[in-house]
Image: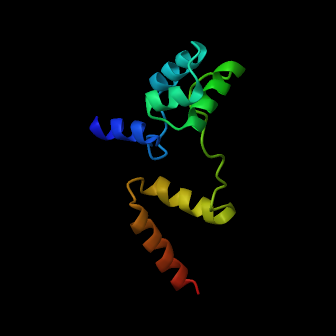
Amino acid sequence: MLRLSFKIIAGEQASNDGATCSLDLRQRVADALAGGMTVRAAALRFGISAATAVRIGQRERSGRGLAPAKMGGHVKPMLRGAAADEVHRRLAAKPDWMVRALAADLGSEHQRNR
């Protein structure tokens, strides 16, 4: 608590190291902003950056809700066609394969077929 007090006095803002804010924290920030608190005051009060407080306020006002947005997107499969079919066939035959064992088996067969 002493460290946070020092940061506020020094004019620095607390950091949460890029971690996602909880829904409860987002709601408290949105309520404070809706109640007339300034963005900078809300950021200092709740230990978040001013930019995060701005984004929370924007999401609340736009009606998009405060839940975190999905991150990432669709990842294309690394194996397609015959290679994917072979892996699926082996996994169906022996479902308890470890990834390394499967890779070693596929690699040794690849070496035999060269």
| Residue located farthest toward the bottom when viewing the structure as drawn | 114
| Residue located farthest toward the front when viewing the structure as drawn | 9
Residue 47, above or below 110 = above
Q: Position of residue 21 (x, y in %)?
A: 48, 33
Q: Residue at the location (60% across, 42% down)?
A: 71
**Foreground of the two, 6 or 55:** 6
Q: Position of residue 49 (x, y in %)?
A: 53, 38
Task: Please give left or right for residue 58 compared with residue 114 in the image.
Answer: right
Q: Position of residue 104 (x, y in %)?
A: 43, 73
Quadrant assignment for the C terminus: bottom right
Q: Residue at the location (69% across, 61% down)?
A: 81
**Foreground of the two, 58 or 88:** 58
Q: Residue at the location (49% across, 77% down)?
A: 107
| Residue located farthest toward the top when viewing the structure as drawn | 35
Quadrant assignment for the N terminus: top left
Q: Residue at the location (47% across, 79% down)?
A: 108
Colour mode of the rendering: rainbow
| Residue located farthest toward the left when viewing the structure as drawn | 2
Q: Position of residue 112 (x, y in %)?
A: 52, 84
Q: How many marks?
A: 0
Task: Please give left or right for residue 76 compared with residue 113 in the image.
Answer: right
Task: Please give left or right for residue 92 compared with residue 60 in the image.
Answer: left
Location of residue 99 (image quadrant): bottom left
